[in-house]
Image: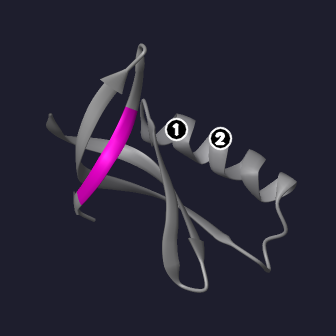
Amino acid sequence: MIELIAALMMYHDGKLIEHTPKENMIKCLKSKRLAEREIDPTQVRFSCKQVEAQTEIYKGRKYITKIIKE
């Protein structure tokens, strides 16, 4: 399914290496703050964005399979 969704994005050396869908931007920003406390911010960068993405639900959890437009 293609939808507009809030996503927590993790970048390393300027390349997107991981993305996680969130219910809304507020929950994304909370997760971002937690991640920045846990992981050395000099190594990776986190951001929250509204993206158009292809998603699928597996075992009751939503996953982003492909980002169409950032």
Q: Residue at x 82, y 60 (%)?
A: 39
Say left or right for 68 vs 9.
left
Is residue 46 covered in magenta?
no
Quadrant (top left/top right/bottom left/bottom right) for the N terminus: top left
Instruction: List x then y, in percent, for residue 9.
Output: 50, 59
Q: What element does badge 1 sit on?
A: helix
Q: Which residues fall within the magenta stretch?
A: 63-67
In this picture the colour scheme is one colour
Query: Residue extending furthest left?
Result: 2
**Magenta stretch, main secondary structure class:** strand
Q: Residue at x 18, y 39 (%)?
A: 3
Q: What element does badge 2 sit on?
A: helix
Query: Residue extending furthest bottom?
Result: 13
Q: What residue type is disc 1 on?
A: Ile
Give the camera-side residue of 58 and 30: 58
Q: Residue at x 85, y 53 (%)?
A: 38
Q: What residue type is disc 2 on?
A: Lys
Marks 1 and 2: in contact by CB < 8 Å?
Answer: yes
Q: Which mark is residue 30?
A: 2
Give the camera-side residue of 70 and 63: 63
Residue hosting label 1:
26
